[in-house]
Image: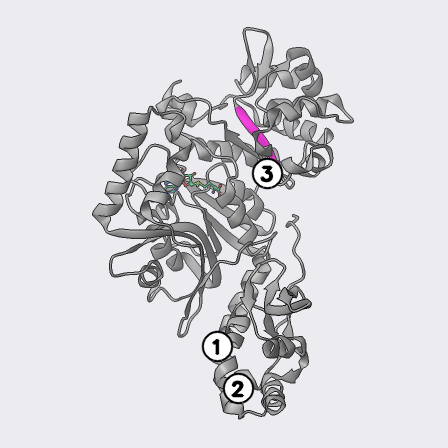
Amino acid sequence: MSVDSVLNPFSSIATADIDKLRARLLELNYQEATFHKILPAFMQGDPTLGGAFPVLQHIKTPDPGLATMILLFVGELPVAETDCRVALGEALFEALLAADFLKRSEAGTITCPLALISIKDIYIVADRATDNSPELVKHLVMAAGPSSVTLANATPRRRVRKALDIGCGGGVQSLQLAKHVDHVVGVDINERALNLGRFAAQLSGAANIDFRYSDFFSAVEGEKFDLIVANPPFVISPESTSQYRDGGLGGDRVTETVIRNAGAFLEEGGISVTVCEWASLLGASANERMQQWTAGNGCDVWISYGTPVEPSRYALTWLQGDQRRLSLAEYSRKYDRWVAHYEALGMQSMQTGLVVMRKRTGENWFYADEAPDEMRGQWGSTLLMMFDLLDNIKNSSLDQLLDQSYRLAPQARMRHLLAQDGARWGQISAELLLEEPLNYTGRVDHHIAKLCARCDGTVTLRQLLLELAESVGRPFEKILDAAMPVLMGLLTRGFLIPASIVPPVKETAPTA
Ligand SMILES: C[S@@+](CC[C@H](N)C(=O)[O-])C[C@H]1O[C@@H](n2cnc3c(N)ncnc32)[C@H](O)[C@@H]1O
């Protein structure tokens, strides 16, 4: 494969033919919503359909053309040429074949070298990880992986003027942004990714994305954005094999580069959301380092971080995928190289997280909290609410917090754990949890549990604590000292919401 054909595949395909392909896909209902109806439940929610290809061979669709498209574009399976001609129509079939978007095998069947995936109502095209040529491995364009989904779900979907997608790859974020942002700039150093992104934008009918070659922020110097999203190649390693995974900067410099710079490109009130990984060093915890990287950038910072893992486990997690391709000796050498890299940098543990920044004039705050057990569905408007909650806490004295009334979040639930107690079940603990979107849990005693249930937005927290003090016959100050640490946790995590803040309604996908 020539470098040119790697960087600009299907350059000969006419825009009109991409439009025809789009029209045909829409006509066949080649869309995620349709897949949900016809595929078994275990394959849903995963745009690559979990690689369960044999299942696809047995799917039943109202139009056989749809089954052919699913086998060809998602299933990585060869289809009969006659079926493909019927599904696409003669003229379009010939055009796609001539442009190498379709390939004829010696056995006379047809395959597609790319995956064409429907996410909600957009189309993305991505590489299959089957070709091992170094040039293609370097420029591989990933489909939507777990980090892509995490980022897309966290992204606030309010309408804004201008957004930047750092490391846009094949455009999975940019295309979703294009639904609620007037003008999207997607930047990447991978020309192949940019070209596949342009192809996908045409295929998705999105005309408001500007795909630019850029080393991080280099091609947007001087520009400001209302929203920045980044799913950079954050894997902490000494590698530079694949651009989508290895930033090639060593250590966690990719995360540092994005975090250190994003603030300067935000409009006042603008938000950046970055999914990334970073390490703790001897003498500096991961969150302290993040605080150093963001200090003085004019942004409030909200971080949700996962459980830190030790370097050897981190290396194994990322190297697992390579195990199949390498001999035992090669695999061991690679592992040793990664671990030596961490040792040389003094890395103690690694963590994954979402780093969200909001540009705001004034004294900025920094808040880092452990990630909830799960982040369910789209929750960008809840993310915006978390900033409102933190603003309220940071701007209020204790008295001001006590004199507000709060509502218990509509998604709050109480879970009791019971154990045998004589001849009956006795309660041993109670846990307050948020069902969605941020599935936080927290132990509470029955006094706090009762207090939370009374939070209906009409009674101040002070009043509720005074009543509690009276009911247990203890001074208010003592009750305050005991209850406040727990209550602060409930306030910052959104269990208790000030009556002045309206909690968001459950989110659905953005539409144009
Ligand atoms: C993990 S992929 C993310 C792709 C897509 N945005 C998503 O969410 O699935 C990281 C992307 O960052 C790009 N990248 C790597 N180094 C970069 C750099 N120095 N500047 C800009 N983009 C870069 C890679 O080519 C790749 O497309």
Q: Residue at image x 41%, y 45%?
A: 232
Spatial CA span between label 3 and label 2: 48 Å
Examine the structure image and report whether residue 181 is included in the region drawn in magenta: no
Report how many numbered discs are placed on residues in the image: 3
SS for dot 3: loop
Judge by depth and name the residue closer to the eye, 368 or 420: 420
In the rendered image, which residue does mark 2 sit on? Answer: 479
Does the numbered disc 3 mark a residue whose Cβ is under 8 Å from ligand 1?
A: no
* Sequence-first disc among 1 and 3: 3
Label 1 packing within 10 angstroms: few (<14), some (14-19), many (20+): few
Residue 194 placement, left or right of 13: left
Circle number at residue 46 = 3
Tell me the mark number nearer the camera, choosing from 1 and 3.
Answer: 1
Q: Amino acid at mark 2?
A: Ile
* Sequence-first disc among 3 and 2: 3
Spatial CA span between label 2 and label 1: 11 Å
Judge by depth and name the residue closer to the eye, 288 or 215: 288
Q: Position of residue 485 (x, y in %)?
A: 48, 77
